[in-house]
Each structure stands twice: as C-alpha cells, then as structure tokens.
Image (cartoon, rainbow, N blue to C red):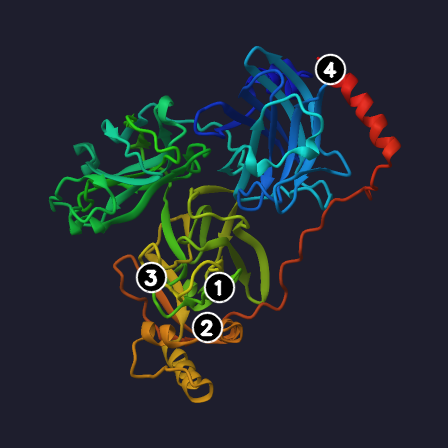
Amino acid sequence: IFLLFTIVADANRQEKDSLLYFETPLDQDGKLYLYWIVDYDEETVTFEVRARASNHDWIGIGFSDRGEITNADLCILWTSKKRKNRFQDTYTDDGGYVAIDDHNDCHLLSLKRRGLTTRYAWSRRFDTCDNQDYFIEEGTTHIVYAMGKGPLRRLEDINLSKEIHGFQRVQLLKNLVPDPRFLADTKSITIHNSKVQVPNNETTYWCSLHILPPEFENKNHVIQFSPAIEDRNKEVVHHMEVFHCEVDADKKLPDWNGPCSSSKKPQILETCKRVLAAWAMGALPFTYPEEAGLPIGGPDFSRYVMLEVHYNNPELKEGMIDSSGVTLTYTSTLRKYDAGVMELGLEYTNKMAIPPHQTDFALTGYCVAECTRAGFPDDGIVIFGSQLHTHLTGIKVYTRHIRGSDELPELNRDNHYSTHFQEIRRLKQQVHVLPGDALLTTCHYSTIDRVNITLGGYAISDEMCVNYVHYYPKMNLEVCKSSIDTKVLYNYFNYMNKYNDEMTSESKPVEENYESIHWSEGNAAFLHHLYSFAPLSMQCNRSSGDRFPGYWNGIQKPYVLYPLPQPTRKCKNNFKKMTKEEEEEGEEEEEEQNNM
C-alpha cells in the first residue's frame, strides 16, 4: 500500500506501520482493487486504486445508493487527446451519462502509471455539502466502478451503463479496533470447506457439517473470528456464517456437504441455526472486548456446527475449487463475562405483512420496557456488537434506544442495507441498556417488483426484521420481539370486509385474509397506519423458548416524548457554479499538476 501510506504518513514515518487500512476487490477478475484509510477527526477517507490498465484507460470509482451506475457519484481518472492526465468529480444521470460536478470534491494525491499498471491515491470528505455528491455514512456503502479505453475527447460523451461497470458492498466507515492482545494459551480452529467444486451458477449457498474437537467437551471462550479464504477465490467468496446445531450433546447428526437448499439435505440439520460467527466480503476479523468471550463447549453443548458459504459467481466460471472457511480463536482461560446474543425486532409470523408495489414500507419490532424489566439483570447489559437481518426486500434497518420518554443514541443503523451483505459489526461505542429500557428495531422494505403480499416468515421469499445484538453478561432473555396483537388484526380483517367489501373473514387464516385484499395505495397506507398504532403481542422468551411470566398480549407501544435530535451537517461553504472562464483556468492548472 505504498502510495496510501506515503500520502497519509509522510509527515511521520514512525507511524506508518501502525496505520489501519482496509481493502476489497471491486471486479470479479481481480483487475481492480480498492484500499482505504479512514480519518474520523478530519471526516475524510483516503483511497488508493490499483488497476491492471494501460496508460490511456480511464477509471471511475464512486458511490450510489444501491450499486446502480445511474445516478451515481464518481471520481474519474482519464487521459485527454493531448495525453494529459485528468481527475474529475462527476455524476451520472438516469441514463448513465456522465456530467461534470460544479464543485470538485475529488482530490488527487498521487498518480503512478507504468505499463499495464495504474496506481493512484485520492481523498474525499464524508459529507461535501454538495447536493451532487454522495453522503458517506455509517453502515453499508455501495462502491461503484467503471472502466474503458482512452484517450478521450471529453467525459460527457461517455454512457457508463454501456461500459465495463459493477459494484461492491463494503462497510467503508469501519470501527478502528486496535489489535487484540491474546494470552499464551490461545488456540484457533478453522472450520472450512474441503475442496468444494464451486458450481457455475451466479449464486450458491454451500453448507457443510463439522464437529468440533473433544476439547470442546469443556467450556471455552471464543474471543475472535476471522475469514480464512484462499487467495485465488477471494473474488467469489461473498460471505460465510458458522451456525451451532441446537441438539442434545450426545445426539449424532448425519453428514452433509452440499447446497444448503438441496431437498436431499437431512431435515434435522435445520436445527443448525444459531449464529456463532458471520463474515462478509470486506469485513475485518470480529474481536470480542477484553472482558467478554462467546461461551462454546461444555458437557451439555453439542459439538456439531454448520458452515455456510455464499459463492457469488456472476461470470459463471467453471473449475474453481475452494476450501475457504472461518477461523475461531478461543481460550480455556475464561474471561470475566460470558457474551450472549439476543434477538430484537419482529416475530417470525405472518401477522406482519408488506403490500406489493411499495417503494418504502416500514415495520417496527418492539422490545418493550416490561420485557427488559422481567429479563435483564439489575445492572443491565452492555451491547458491543450487532448484526442486522432481513430477507430480500429489506433496504434500511436501525434500532432506537428509549429510556422513559427520552430517546438515546441509536444502537445501530444501516441506511443502505442489503441482505447480500450481512456481517456482525462491533459498535463504535458500547451501549449500556438498563431494565425498563425499550429497543425499537425498524426495517424498511421495497416490494416495488412484487405483485403479491409479502408475509413474515422463514422462507427467503418471506420477510424478517431482526437485530442480533451481542452483549455481556449473558442472561436468560434470548428473544425480545413483537407482532401486532392478534385480536386487533382480526378486527381489521372484519372492518375490511364490512366497509371495503374485501373478501376477508375471521374464519379465514391470516395468510388467506391478507391475500384476499386488493392492495390499492389507500389500503396499503391504511395497513401501515394500523401497524403504527395497534397494541402488541410480545415474545419475551427465555433461552428455553418459554416466555417470562406475565401477560404479553395487548401491550401498548412506548411513547417517545423527546426524540433524538437530527445530526447537524458541518457545511462551511456555499458552493457556486463555476463560470466558463474559471472552468478553463482550473482545467489548465489541473493538467499541469497531473501531467506525470
């Protein structure tokens, strides 16, 4: 990362080795790599691009809401007909055509071209206060790229949708966790595939059953998990998860090594659903705080785990053999606290539904104060990690933290969420949650391309809304989720029959009632209003699956009197559109500086 380190650390050579940089491949062929460093004090990201490209090829790297090359914000390196290197701030319209931004927020720091190798570094502020620029924020960022042959007469002649282009999902603003310090007795085990022949399909989920070694008959603490990916396959290994099989310790399970969705997969392996570790492309190792570890092993603990690897192979390549997996770092020297995982959000039930043709339909799952009072220890819990989860139509997820009538800082948020990029993320600040606090998890969905109602449930075509929070000390409360009160829902179905002439009835099951409604814009809005104000049915469940004592139907939603203020933007300049003379003067100056 020579250029990147040189740019950032030139003033202090001794700090160079301590810089924390991140990297990801952008294309499937490994021709384009992106490296970056985050400076939170200056609210700036410094990038380095490495490309296999000729001296005259142009390269555009930037951002868009969902990875589209249309309506994108890009910094483009190109060569003019006079063989001058140019680096410009651009954006694309609805059709993919390039336009030059009125204000340049792409700052080229260095450029080196030699033969078929191009390397350059540039910087960009999180928020440029320019309406033509993308706002870099917490959560998932869709990095877009485009490449083509040069030299060019001008950029405005290019339609990026007709050139080589693509995108990659990353967490750009990562948590800068220092390197962990492990004790001498720390060990590691890699749960990995064994020479899997990757199918020539665009998407494959491959599952393999593994059994942990006998030493896990005693309790250990997992203190880190990290990817173990073969270099030749790092462009196709999209994400991986390790699940624990929730069966009796002496239960023997049938072997499996094949597609996760295969009809031949033994049904009992559906018990392998409790997440132990999760990694997604571009993610760093997940390290537990020094005071806690994930308990694994013991006399009542089944040693069976399932590895799930998502292979993304859009070019349908054949002949790839892969043995990638996840490395668990663990210790028998137990830490002060056992870490636990609690589910927040919506119940897995068809009582919650999303009408078709919706661009943004929000549902909220509640972990109410009554449940945290019943299940939390007196001193509360400390949440340090979070994994947001929906199925295919989820586009945004966040969890709010309520104490009394006050809203505290959010627990996690991803405004550009994608089900194809799920990772367990360390929170930048640990969150102390007390008995009596409420946690509200909201998921936004887009069903614009669906013609039928989408119900809550387990199938990939159904929907979920979950935040798996990682916390300590481990407690007996494992599920704190809600759905609409059943009696209120059937009152709604009766109303729709009586006043809207819909073919709904209290004698029909929930699914049939939802499917009987004509989902006009008005009916969709009415359902959303119902969900917003109706009382709740709560799952306030122990690890055994039993509810805590209490009456958990007809629960009122928490009332937020003092919501969290919206963050203020740090905009110091009011940018004006450049005159033609200023544009030409800037172009001449930039050409002189970039002519290398």
Tell me the element at label 1.
loop
Amino acid carrying mark 2 in the image: Trp
Image disc number at residue 382: none
Amino acid carrying mark 3 in the image: Gly
Q: Residue at image x 69%, y 36%?
A: 90
Tell me the element at label 2.
loop
Ranked by sequence position, the earlier of labels 3 and 2 is: 3
Q: Residue at image x 63%, y 18%?
A: 56
Residue 582 image position (x, y, % from top left): 86, 31
Quick one: label 1, few (<14), some, or many (20+) residues within 10 Å?
some
Ranked by sequence position, the earlier of labels 4 and 1 is: 1
Amino acid carrying mark 1 in the image: His
Tell me the element at label 4.
loop
Residue 569 image position (x, y, % from top left): 72, 47
Can residue 173 be seen here?
no
Task: From the viewer's side, name the closer residue of 75 and 237.
Answer: 75
Disc 4 target residue: 595
Quick one: label 2, few (<14), some, or many (20+) residues within 10 Å?
some
Disc 2 target residue: 519
Tell me the element at label 3.
loop
